[in-house]
Every structure is written in structure tokens, then in C-alpha cells.
Image: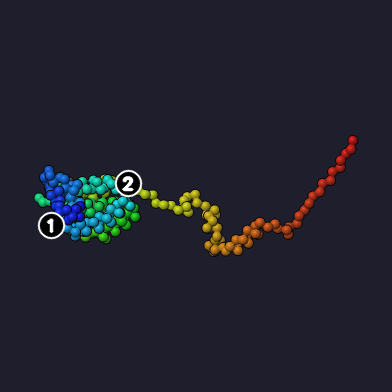
Amino acid sequence: MYWIELRFGFNFNAHGLKPRTFSGLQGVLFSPFIHSSVEHLYNNSLPLFILLAALFYFYPSVKYKVLWWGLLGAGILTWIMGRDSYHIGASGVVYMLTSFLFFKGIWSKNYRLIALSLIVVFLYGSMVWGIFPQQERISWEGHLGGLLIGIVLAFLFKVPSSSEKKYYWEKENFQEEDDPFLQQFDEHGNFITASQLEADDASNSSVDCTEDVQFQYKLSKNKKE
């Protein structure tokens, strides 16, 4: 969108989100695609790409719902509480994704998702200061709206918990004596070489000829009539 502005000399700022005006409602949908400079576009694009990749990989069942309702919710909250100015940029969506990934991971009690939450905090934890008024040109209301709607979505959307993978030796019906790997060790845990296994097999299959063999004969007479 920003390339179109540069290439054809357009200015889409008027299509941004302007709080508490009917015409400003269009910005709920359009403002995330409008940026004021290359730096503004870059600062939003890189974290947006990383957070979207995490959302699509770890939460595939709710990814589109989170994007749609997060975009609408963050925009509406900004429209309600924002200053009387045009709010543009995808930073509200970035804050929404950051908030959702962090709180959803913590509440899920899944070690993989908790690890994802910690990574998000490590990468973008400093973004929390963006929800407070700092610079006049920065829409802290959009950041705050994205943060709040991310918390709400993390609470509302139930993600099916992925069952942890169980290896066959962790199952209840596992029999150690039937396992081909454990058969390579003796009762003391020592590894049995291939030659020893062959020798044991040969001894088990051989016939012991040292034992006495006894034969019994029974003679019978045929009677002639």
C-alpha cells in the first residue's frame, strides 16, 4: 500500500481510523495497511511477520479467528478511546498478536507454548512501554487497544491441547523381554555381542548327546488259527 502511495502520489491517510466519527470507522479495516514512512512500515512488518508465523504454527485451529476479531477489536477500541486524529499503521495488530501469544501460552500450561511466551517477551517485552503516552505522533491508544483485545481473545478462544507423544516403552502394555533393543543386554545391563548371541542360539538349538538314551522293545507273538 505504501508503495502505491509513492508510485502514484496518493495519500491514504484520510482512510485511516479517526475516533468517534462515522467516516473514521473505515479505518478499522484499512488503517493497518496504511503507513506514513518506510521506517514506520519496517518497524511493523518485521515483528508482524514473526508473530504471524508463530500464530499460524502453534495455533492453526484459531489463527484466522484471532486475526479477524483481533483486527476488528483493536480498531474499535482505538475508535472509542483514541485522540481526535488519524490513526494509521499495523502496530495495533502487532500488540494484539504479542498479547495473545503471551497470555495464551501462559494459561495453556503447555511447556512448548510457555516457551513461546517467554520468547515473545524476550523479543518484544519492551513494547509494553508503547501503551503509555510518549510521543505525540505515536498512537498509544492503538497499542493499548491491541493489548487489551489480545488478552480477551486469549481468554475466549479454547485451543485443543495437543497430547504429548508417548514412546512405545512408555506405554502400559510394554514388555521388556519382547523388546529387540533390550534383548541385547543381559540382566546386569552389560551389552551382549553378536558372537555371544550366536553362541547362545547355537547352544539352545543343539542336542545334548551325553545323556543316556534308553530304548524299550516289546515282542509280541502272532497267533495262527
Image coords of residue 39 (percent x, y): 19, 60
Q: Is residue 216 above or below residue 225?
A: below
Identity of the residue drawn at 24% across and 46% down: 68
| Alpha carbons under labels 1 and 2: distance apart | 37 Å
Checking the image for residue 61, the label placed there is 2
User: Front-most of 29 and 127?
Assistant: 29
Q: Circle 1 sits in a helix, a strand or a loop, which is it?
A: loop
- Dot 1 amino acid type: Arg
Is 188 displayed left or right of 109 in the figure? right
- The quarter of the displayed image where residue 185 is located: bottom right
Choose mark 1 or mark 2, whichever is in front. Answer: 1
Checking the image for residue 221, the label placed there is none
User: Front-most of 6 and 125?
Assistant: 6
Checking the image for residue 137, the label placed there is 1
Q: Earlier in the sequence, mark 1 or mark 2?
A: 2
Is 193 displayed left or right of 64 in the figure? right
Q: Residues within 10 Å of mark 2 (few under 14, many from 20)?
A: some
Is 51 displayed left or right of 140 in the figure? right
Q: Circle 2 sits in a helix, a strand or a loop, which is it?
A: loop
